[in-house]
Image (cartoon, grey):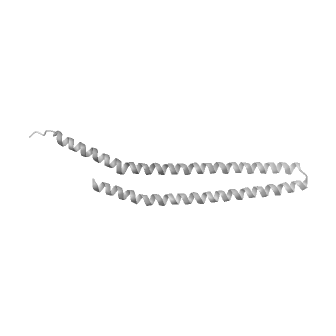
Amino acid sequence: MEIMPNPQVMLVVFIVFMVTMFMLNKFVFQPLFAYMDQREQKVTSDLELVTREDNELQRIENEIHEILSHAKTQAFTAKEEQVEEAKKSAGAKIERMQNENREKMDAFMAKLQESRDSMKNELRANIGDIESLLAAKIKHI
């Protein structure tokens, strides 16, 4: 008994394989990759936002240090009465800017935490959908 390859069976197997690959690509892999790309873009944009806010905070801190240095320089060169006035003014301005910075930072951190929680919840919600889609597609195969 000699086994001979049957071209018709090979052609049918090849066609079924190609259709299966096409269906998997269209209904499983492309949506999954699209979701992963979207998530990566969101994470990247959030990281860029954090970097910009950090740079802004650094700039404000440098400005605060410059204001403080300027206030100290004026304090040493001015009379005793002017020294007290300059210290009060610089101290109030620094405190106000620090409070503003703290408020901005607190608001940003709250927004970031809210965004992080929202993204986690969204991902958790979508994982069930993805799993059910995959399970349904695998059952149909």
Q: Position of residue 22 (x, y in %)?
A: 31, 46
Q: Position of residue 16 (x, y in %)?
A: 24, 46
Q: Is residue 52 left or right of residue 125?
A: right
Q: Position of residue 8 (x, y in %)?
A: 17, 41
Q: Residue at x 33, y 49 (%)?
A: 24
- What is the quadrant of the N terminus in the image? top left
Foreground pick, 125 / 69: 125
Foreground pick, 84 / 104: 104
Q: Quadrant of residue 135?
A: bottom left
Foreground pick, 58 / 56: 56
- The single residue placed furthest to the left in the displayed view is 1
Q: Is residue 44 left or right of residue 101?
A: left
Q: Position of residue 125 (x, y in %)?
A: 44, 60
Number of residue marks: 0
Foreground pick, 77 / 7: 7
Eyeballing the image, is 113 above or below 16? Answer: below
Q: Residue at x 24, y 43 (%)?
A: 15
Q: Residue at x 18, y 43 (%)?
A: 9
